[in-house]
Image: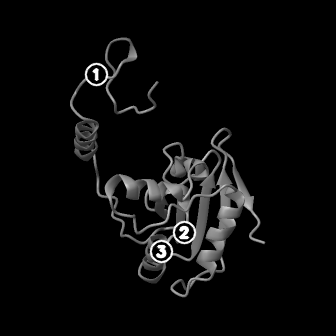
Amino acid sequence: MTTSASVPAGPEGSIAPRGTVTDRLVDANEAYAAAFTDPGMDARPVLHVAIVACMDARLDLHAALGLELGDCHTIRNAGGVVTDDVIRSLTISQRALGTRSIVLIHHTGCGLENLTEDFRHELEDEVGQRPAWAVEAFRDVDQDVRQSMQRVRTSPFLVHTDDVRGFVFDVKTGLLREIDPA
């Protein structure tokens, strides 16, 4: 079963062969662009908020949080963990584009709960080079949210760390559960 409205269906619900997935995305973009109107916005988010979340395809952040185009900056990666690159993006978001609040969103059933740092060693064995990045795997999603909040709050590059809140999104119910930073 597919949930993508832009993927054409063939007989009996099968996906019609029309090239690659990327070809279908480009076709969908052409249809989007044909009806597109410049919203007249700049890069500064209307709500002055940056959201850091997992890249999991089950998280529709705009729908789940009642957001519209232009409301926020959205930074996504595997696990929604606060890495050096996330700090980089948040720093630009705050210092150059005016955000003041940061919302961190992890979720139940995250794939990083099933990995370990051995993943990096396996990659090294396979390709002959160790990745420069850490997997950032975790076993306790609540504790990982706390760690991410701490990384944001202690970063010397971020000037607005008084409104940092962390949540776990339940992929079965769609509800957010706030995590106490203590």
Foreground: 151 or 52? Answer: 151
Q: Is residue 25 left or right of residue 148?
A: left
- Neighbourhood count class around disc 2 (C-alpha, 10 Å): few under 14, some 14–19, many 20 upward: many
> Which residue is denoted by mark 3 in the rendering?
84
Camera-near label (3 vs 1) is 3
Mark 1 secondary-structure assignment: loop
The reply to whether callout 3 and callout 1 are in contact (CB within 8 Å) is: no
Q: Nearer the viewer, mark 2 or mark 1?
A: 2
Q: Secondary structure at mark 2?
A: loop
Which callout, 2 or 1, points at the residue further toward the start of the chain? Answer: 1
**Image quadrant assignment for residue 39:** bottom left
Measure the C-alpha gap from mark 3 to mark 1: 41 Å
Residue type, numbered disc 1: Ala
Q: Is residue 158 left or right of residue 92?
A: right
Q: What residue is pinned by disc 2?
A: 82
Q: Nearer the viewer, residue 120 or 20?
A: 120
Rendering coords of residue 169 (x, y %): 65, 50
Residue appearing at x 54%, y 69% in the figure: 82
Q: Which residue does the image show at 28% across and 21% down from the upper left? A: 16
Q: CA distance from mark 3 to mark 2?
A: 7 Å
Residue 113 in the image: above or below residue 22: below
Residue 171 horizontal/vertical position (percent): 63, 42
Label 3: few (<14), some or many (≥20) within 10 Å?
few
Identify the mark at residue 16; answer none if there is no mark. 1
Does residue 102 sit above or below 59 in this rendering?
below
Residue 84: horizontal and vertical position, in percent? Answer: 47, 74
